[in-house]
Image (spheres, rainbow, N blue to C red):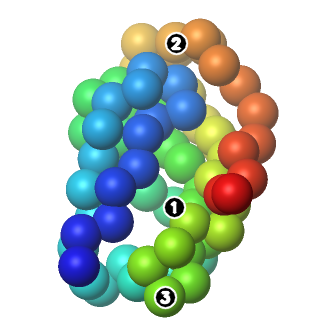
């Protein structure tokens, strides 16, 4: 099962593999290099927040996103 996320900083679409189905930790955006804190349970997003900007320093959108 592939887990699909979008970066909170740049909107880049990311896909995570099965190893992330039950994961609570950091993920780096492959587009802008921003570090995101994500919490996943059984492949479903519980929470995601931006914890560090990538080298470009983009700040398009800042804050927490809660899964619906």
Dot 1 falls on a residue whose secondary structure is strand
Residue 50 horizontal/vertical position (percent):
64, 40
Residue occupying image coordinates x 43% and y 56%? 27
Residue 53 place in picture, x, y as percent: 55, 28
Q: Nearer the viewer, mark 3 or mark 1?
A: 3
Residue highlighted by disc 3:
42
Tag 2 or tag 3, which sits nearer the N-term?
3
Q: Residue at x 50, y 44 (%)?
A: 35
**Residue at disc 3, secondary structure:** loop
- Badge 1 is on which residue? 26
Q: Is residue 1 left or right of residue 37?
A: left
Residue 54 is at least partly visible in this image? no
Whole-percent x and y of residue 22? 49, 87
Please tell me how crowded label 3 is: few (under 14), some (14-19), or many (20+) other residues with Cα within 10 Å: few
Q: Is residue 5 above or below residue 43?
A: above
The residue that label 2 is drawn on is: 58
Residue visible at 71% across and 25% down in the picture: 62
The image quarter containing residue 55 is top left
- Circle 2: is it few (<14), some (14-19), or many (20+) Cα within 10 Å? some
* CB contact under 8 Å: marks 3 and 1: no
Of the 4 image quadrants, the one containing the N terminus is bottom left
């Amino acid at each position: 099962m592939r887990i699909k996320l979008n970066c909170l900083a740049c909107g880049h679409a990311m896909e995570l593999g099965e190893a992330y189905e039950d994961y609570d930790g950091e993920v780096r955006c492959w587009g802008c290099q921003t570090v995101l804190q994500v919490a996943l349970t059984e492949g479903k997003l519980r929470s995601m927040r931006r914890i560090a900007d990538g080298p470009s320093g983009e700040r398009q959108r800042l804050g927490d996103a809660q899964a619906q």
